[in-house]
Image: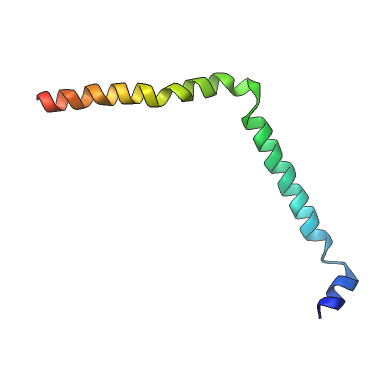
């Protein structure tokens, strides 16, 4: 059964085309995400946890104090 499948070779092209398409999209997304044009966005997102913590801490203190 497998011998006949591999000898025909018709269905072997589709998985290779799909894998190559996925790899191109994946590496394109990685390159886009790590590009230098996105540095301002990364810097803004890097400071969000600190800003949220300071904001939330003050908010919790207000709740505790009444």
> In percent of the image, x 53 and y 22: which residue is there?
41
Question: Where residue 51 sits: x, y (%)?
Answer: 36, 21
Q: Quadrant of the N terminus?
A: bottom right
Q: Going by the image, does 30 lie left or right of 2?
A: left
> In percent of the image, x 82 and y 66: which residue is there?
11
To which quarter of the image does residue 16 belong? bottom right
Q: Going by the image, does 28 lie left or right of 1?
A: left
Q: Quadrant of the C terminus?
A: top left
Rendered position, 25 above or below 14 = above
Q: Going by the image, does 50 lie left or right of 9?
A: left
> In percent of the image, x 20 and y 27: which residue is there?
60
How many numbered marks have been drawn onto this rendered protein structure?
0
> In percent of the image, x 70 and y 39: which residue is there?
27
Q: Residue furthest left?
A: 66
Colour scheme of the rendered structure: rainbow
Rendered position, 17 above or below 11 = above
Q: Residue furthest right?
A: 7
Question: Where residue 25 sits: x, y (%)?
Answer: 70, 42
Q: Going by the image, does 53 lie left or right of 26?
A: left
């Amino acid at each position: 059964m497998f011998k006949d499948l591999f000898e025909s070779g018709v269905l072997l092209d589709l998985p290779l085309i799909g894998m190559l398409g996925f790899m191109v999209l994946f590496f394109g997304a990685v390159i886009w995400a790590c590009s230098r044009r996105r540095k301002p966005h990364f810097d803004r997102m890097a400071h969000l946890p600190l800003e949220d913590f300071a904001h939330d801490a003050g908010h919790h203190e207000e709740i505790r104090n009444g």
